[in-house]
Each structure stands twice: as structure tokens, then as C-alpha cells.
Amino acid sequence: MMPPFATDLAVRRLITATGQAPSVLNTQPWRLRTVRGECAELLADPDRRLRASDPRGRSLHVSCGAALFNLRLAVWTTGHRPLVRLLPNTAGEPRLLAAVHASPYGPALSRTRELYDSIGLRRTNREPFGERRLPRHVLADLRRAAACEGAALVVLDPRASADLLECVAVADDELSGDSGYRAELRAWTTGGSRCDGLPSYAQGPRCADDPAPVRDFGQHGGREPVHFESRPQLAVLTTAGDRPVDWLRAGQALQRLLLTATLHGISASFLNQPLDLRDMRHRSDPHHRRGHIQMIMRLGYGPAVPRAPRRPTTELA
């Protein structure tokens, strides 16, 4: 069986899948290269790191972890098992986040194929969600998805969600006073014909509620403020550790659960301002009983939304 890295066409397919992953502010901070047709290497793109809001590179690693999960799915669908080494050469090549080899395996499992087919359907949805709560069996499936990648999804009850929304609002207010943070946010949320960043159509409407269950990037395309769901359903993604290898695992868990959510018709958006503030101020992590919080997300049933722009495959190799 021909390795999935052996031809230009096969590699382009892998790059396309990798490039569809979610990333902080849609920076898409990754590159993919092949080595002698035997291995694919996922590298961080340091030029796309958010210097102000991500001084540790945590968000970059989470983003690249999500891209790595897509790469793994693409390898599985070629009839191969992906063999992944995380951070294989931190001293010699710090940009190298993962090396992926492939071993002949056989047809991909049906769930693997379903997740792969969902890559192009997944969206970050910043629109109002419906009031319907997620069923228990769906939440259980999302928890299993996170656990498969060594992370934990903690779904918050309404009271804890309301408390967390207040924390998000406080963090947002503090971040708004940081000029470097504001400049960085503007740089990645401007309009125009770009293949990255968040154009106004992807940012959603302004929220008429307080505290808002969605991040306000300031570009709404002239839309009027609207009311969001009355009881936003929030969850946090946690890892046992808080090192680069844990961040990569968090990204893989994030993408597995987002694709699983897509299969169930579930939408998601993110409220990571408290985590940005923690990283920027070098504050200690308020350790949750089930680990370090790496993502704060809002889950629910949302309307169809357009896809954020994507870099062409020629820029990713």
C-alpha cells in the first residue's frame, strides 16, 4: 500500500484537511512538510503567533493540536494508522510540533470516516443559539471525545455558567485597557479580501444582553444588537498538565469533540478572555479539580453560518 505522503496529490489532500482546523482568531499558525515521502511534520508558524495575547504560545499549540487531529483523520482514511510523536526535537527544531508516520492498517472505522467528512462542515458559530438544552447522550458523547485525546470536558450547570460569564466580562474589561492587545485584535479582525483572520461576517451580531455569552470583536457589518439565549450552556476543556505537550493534546481533544458536536448538529463558540488574561499577566492557573482549563466554550443549537476564510494549500507547505 502506497504511503499517504508519497505523491503530491496525496500530500495536498492532507494539507487541505489540516488547514480546515479552528485556530485562535483564525490565524492558522501551522505549516506541513513531508520528509522523503515517509513522514509528515507539523510545524508552528511563528510569524502568526499572537505576541501580545499569547506570550507562552499556549493558544498557538492548541490551534496546531486541532490541525494535527485533522491530519490524523486524513491519514486514517487512506487505510493507514497514524503514528504520532509530539515535540520530537524541541532542542534542534523548536518549531516542530509533531512528526506523523503511517503504518498500513485497513479501511477506516465508520466513526473515523464520519469525523473526517465533518471537517469541512464544522464552523465556529457566534450567532444566538436556541433555548434547547443538549441531551445527556450528546454530552456523554462529547465527554468521550475529549477523553479519547487525554483531556476532560466539564459541562457547567446554569449557576456555574452564569458565574463564568461574569468572569469573562471582567476579563474583557481588563483586556480592553491593554493597547497591545487591542492592536493585535484589530489586526486580525479587519475586513477586506484576506484568507485568514475574522471578517465581520464571521463575528456574529452585537449582543444586547449583559453579560454577553459571545465575544465582541467590534465588527458587526451594520447589524443591530440582538438577544442571545437566556441560559447559555458553557463547558471547559481541561488537561492534567499545563505544558506544550498538554496544549497539543488539548487541541486534538478540542477538534475531536467539535467534529463530534458537528455530527450531532451542535454549534460552538469560545469565550477565552480569562485564559488570555491569565497568560498575558503570567498569573497562576486556578487549578480545576479535573485539570488546567485550556478552552472555555459555549455549546448549543445554532443557525447555519458561513465558513471563515482559509489560506491556500500552497501557503501551508
Image (cartoon, grey):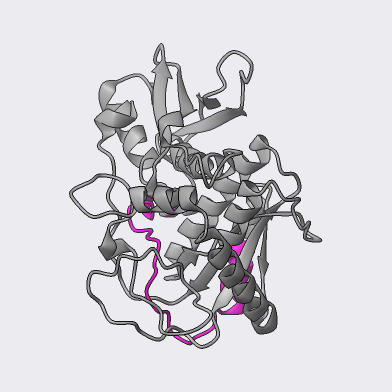
In the rendered structure, which segment of residues is drawn in magenta?
115-143
Query: Which residue extends farthest right?
Result: 289
Q: Is residue 274 left or right of residue 186?
A: right
Give the percent coordinates (x, y) of residue 56.
Answer: 61, 38
Q: Quadrant of the N terminus?
A: top left
Residue 292 in percent (x, y) is at 72, 53
The residue located at (23%, 69%) in the rendering is: 221
Classify residue 151 as left or right of residue 214. Answer: right
Q: Residue 90, how many percent across, how many down? A: 62, 21
Q: Is residue 185 above or below residue 302?
A: above
Q: Decide whether the magenta segment is chiefly helix, strand or loop.
A: loop
The answer to whether residue 144 is above or below residue 46 is: below
Identify the residue at image location x=67%, y=41%.
246
Residue 35 visible in rendering: yes
- In magenta segment, residue 215: no
Q: Residue at x 42, y 79 (%)?
A: 129
Q: Nearer the viewer, residue 47 or 10?
A: 47
Quadrant of image for the C terminus = top left
Q: Quadrant of residue 153?
A: bottom right
Q: Is residue 110 visible?
A: no
